[in-house]
Amino acid sequence: MSGHDQLVYCLCELTRLLWKLLLPLLFLCVLLIAVLVLLVLAVRFWLQSKRNARWARDGRSAVAFFHPYCNAGGGGERVLWCAIRALQNRYPGVNFVVYTGDLYMTGQQILDKARRRFNIVLPRPVQFVYLRHRLLVEPGLFPHFTLLGQSVGSIFLGWEALTEFVPDLYIDSMGYAFTLPLFRYLGGCSVGSYVHFPTISTDMLSVVRERNPRINNPDYVSNSLFLSAFKVVYYCMFALLYGMAGSCSDLIMVNSSWTLNHILSLWHAPNSTTVVYPPCDVSAFLDIPLEEDGDRKCHSIISIGQFRPEKDHRLQIGAFKRLLDRRRQSAGGRETLKLVLVGGCRNQEDEDRVLMLRGLCQQLDIADRVEFKLNVPFEELKRELGDATIGLHTMWNEHFGIGVVECMAAGKVIVAHKSGGPKLDIVVPYEGGQTGFLADNEQSYAEAMERILALPSASRLEIRRNARQSVARFSDEEFEACFLAAVEPLMGTLER
């Protein structure tokens, strides 16, 4: 047998072997798919039976909000409680449930904090479903591949929530998009989402591609061509999965133009996506008087925001240090200025961050001019705003910026980051008049604050008036009207 014939014979034998193996493999794949489908159907049937049992017991529909950190006291929590208040007033015959991981707080304690922090009182109590495994979405659990780790963790946390309570309508109000397919396809629920900010964005991809050091792109990654290329691939793959999960939502509400642009590019669901600006209690700040402040002996600069890393309090402290250095020779010197940082701490990591910031103030020798106000009640927040001259905001690509709106409603001259929601939606001209200032680094922040302090009192007053009038479109009433209009089609599906 020639070499050619031997080669043909070997190829024929190899083909026969592969064919013999292929049929069992195909059969095995079909069998596994069938088992998986049956398993999914069995789980769905089990969950449906739990929901039917609840219906037989309660005789009414249930709307559940997934908000594991509902006691955090930030802007996302204000959205949660305002949304529930609006729905309770409109739909008195519906039960409302909140999935929370705040195990050591009673439901009444959580509601009391919402009243103290946001001045929000619900018409009637809500049911809290406590989740024991909130640790699965803590960023500290995933020092590497944090986005992927938290997203996988949210699936397990969502499964715990779904097995504890099966609602008729599920609303993710905290940005855990990977829970949406669970509730839609396994729970058989209508699903909606209120997106404060995308888990991943094209801006984050740009930062990694351009190898710029940021919170989400540490120096050891940005300095490495290989690690940067690997991270770009990782981000692109994650963005694809994130878009697939988000597209499962029947209704998508976003909080700003900036978030809208990113969600449209990732989730590709323009027909079900709408902008619903978050609620800001602007009316509660209208009793803070607007008057000239030229006779003040000390000008207070206030920052409102949770002590999270992305809020960039280090930038605020660094800019304030530069401002103090610039005004060292002026009348009164540093004694005429103070920085007040008002915010909430969600966990021990946030409290440790506050300790680090206090240490930074000591290191810069400005500790006597910086005050930290943690988890303060609403009335104390108002007092601090009333005493302030300037509002300060430093988060890069802030999705919206409720703290910015609160400062403007209180009649403060705001200096916000030149990006995201503050740039596109909030610190914009009002009837041709200036409403505030934008900056993006320590020097530009210090220059803006120095310019504000150098303005005549009457000029500052004009900016403050413009700012207050411009934020009326972000009131609680506007939010409730827009939110109810958005969710009305989904609430209609609750009729049985």
Image (cartoon, helix red, strand yellow):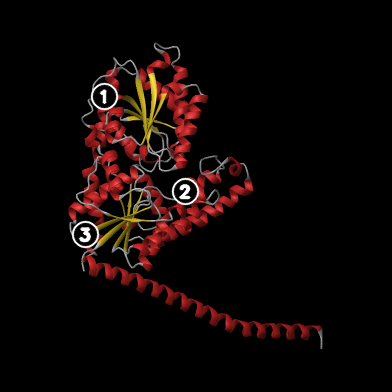
**Mark 1 = which residue?**
462
Q: Earlier in the sequence, mark 2 or mark 3?
A: 3
**Mark 2 = which residue?**
202
In this view, the residue in front, 50 or 274, is 50
**Mark 1 vs mark 2, CA separation in Å:** 37 Å
Left or right: 21 as drawn, with respect to 258? right
**Mark 2 vs mark 3, CA separation in Å:** 39 Å
Give the residue furthest to the bottom: 1
Q: Nearer the viewer, mark 2 or mark 3?
A: 3
Say if residue 276 shows up in the picture: no
Residue type at numbered disc 1: Glu
Which quadrant of the view contains residue 47?
Answer: bottom left
**Mark 3 vs mark 1, CA separation in Å:** 46 Å
**Mark 3 = which residue?**
94
Q: Looking at the image, is 237 positioned above or below residue 80?
A: below
Left or right: 481 as drawn, with respect to 233? left
How busy is the neighbourhood of tag 2: few (under 14 within 10 Å), some, or many (20 plus)? some
Q: Earlier in the sequence, mark 1 or mark 2?
A: 2
What residue lies at 44% left-to-right and 30% top-to-bottom? Answer: 316
Residue type at numbered disc 3: Val
Say if residue 166 shows up in the picture: yes
